[in-house]
Image: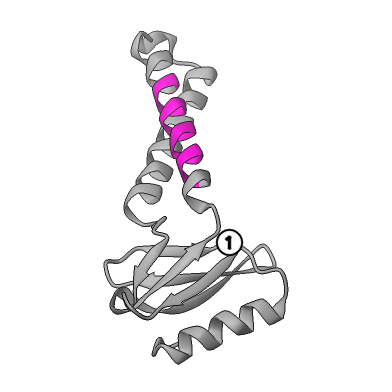
Amino acid sequence: MKVTYNEKENSIEIKDGIKKQYFILKLLMVLNLINALVRLIDVNKSEFGFIEFIWLTLGILSLILLYFFIFKRSTAQKIEIEKIKGLKEKSAFGRKRFYLELSDGKQRNLLSFKNEFEFAKIRELLTHVGIEN
């Protein structure tokens, strides 16, 4: 992952390939949702069994995840400094994850750091441009 500060445009450029990953995830969620709808569209109420319940659950989960990927996550590679609220951290399954909180309510995930030095360097860059950690 490479993060650089562009002084001319007063923005941060992040090159980490997250746009491709999120596109694939969105595509899979759409296909999963379509598959669930096709399976459930022709089911009579008397035939609603275990398999239909699984497809209904998968469809609902796909719809929820698709909502989060479209409206709550950002894949922007160039982010203006004014749009960044701060650098946040959360732990999930014993692993720390970092993201930029944006002013429009979205989050820009920072995928992974090679080592602690790389993270310290990014934190220093954000502090230098005036973003609170």
Q: Quadrant of residue 44?
A: top left
Disc 1 marks which amino acid? Leu
- Asked if residue 27 is among those painted magenta in the image, a careful observer would answer yes
Image spot of residue 71 (x, y percent): 31, 52
Image spot of residue 76 (x, y percent): 39, 58
As displayed, is residue 124 above or below residue 113? below
Tell which of 111 and 3 is nearer to you: 3
Q: Quadrant of residue 37?
A: top left
Q: Quadrant of residue 50?
A: top right
As displayed, is residue 44 above or below residue 87? above
Q: Residue at x 43, y 22 (%)?
A: 36
State the extent of the magenta-drawn residues as a range.
Answer: 22-35
Q: Which residue is mark 1?
A: 111
Q: What secondary structure is the magenta-colored segment mainly?
A: helix
As displayed, is residue 85 above or below residue 54? below
Image spot of residue 21 (x, y percent): 53, 45
